[in-house]
Amino acid sequence: MIIGNEEIRDYEAVESIRKAVPAKSGGSIMKLHYEAVTDALRQDVLALRTAKGQEGYIEPVSQCLEEACDDCRWRPVAIYDKDNIVGFAMYGYFLPEYPPDGRLWLDRLLIDARCQGKGYGKAAMSDLLHRLYREYPDRDKIYLSVIRENKAAISLYEQFGFAFSDERDTKGEYVMVKELVNFNYGKYCTNR
């Protein structure tokens, strides 16, 4: 089925798009957009911070950008609401490490401490899943990892259909997987 220029794999996904309600922040409609992290955006991204008590839940943005420089399969993106940076994410597809089909990883999602509690995490997660679905149409699973103590992140991921697998990543974090067979964009679509 085609909606606009995008192919949709199943009826459920089509229905969820039709019912989508724009996400709101502080009473105004979010206008999230995602920019590849370039030298021009680097300082904006490096200024992002976790909230107090979340420091060990995600690697510092500087480390994420170093990893992306060392391995071009990573795609770091800055998350903006209109002209204001609100977060950061990084994703990539890795074949040789996970034969025979490889794995698509949504490895990092950080909403700046000043922007938390306003719906940006849900909106960004919805948008990022949509983006991964479009950019990697032949993948049927998305992987991410999480520290067990990060209850807020786990709750968010579960709302979007991620479930724990029986494995841990190379850093000892718990791996969660989302099957894309019955992909549901969710009610937090912001930019369709």
Image: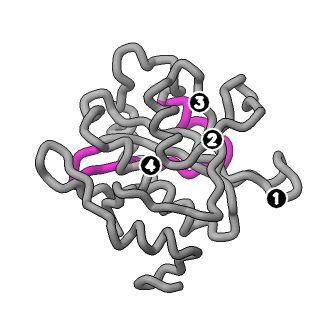
Front in this rendered view, residue 186 or 54: 186
What is the secondary structure assignment of the residue under circle 1? loop
Q: Earlier in the sequence, mark 1 or mark 4?
A: 1
User: Is 97 situated left or right of 127 in this image?
Assistant: right
Give how far across and how far down residue 116 sits, in percent. 29, 32
Which residue was labeled with disc 3? 146
Per the image, label 3 sits on a secondary structure element best described as: strand
List the residue tagged with mark 4: 125
Q: Nearer the viewer, residue 167 or 30?
A: 167
Q: Is residue 5 magenta?
A: no
Residue type highlighted by circle 3: Val
Nearer to us of marks 2 and 3 is 2
Rendered location of residue 94, percent (x, y): 74, 51
Q: Is residue 125 above or below residue 59?
A: below
Chain part drawn in magenta: 61-85
73 with respect to 156 (left or right) = right
Residue 137 visible somewhere in the drawing: yes
| Residue 93: % across, % down | 68, 54
Q: Is residue 73 visible?
A: no
What's the distance in space between the residues labelled 2 and 3, CA to CA?
11 Å
The Cα–Cα distance between marks 1 and 2, rounded to whole angstroms, is: 20 Å
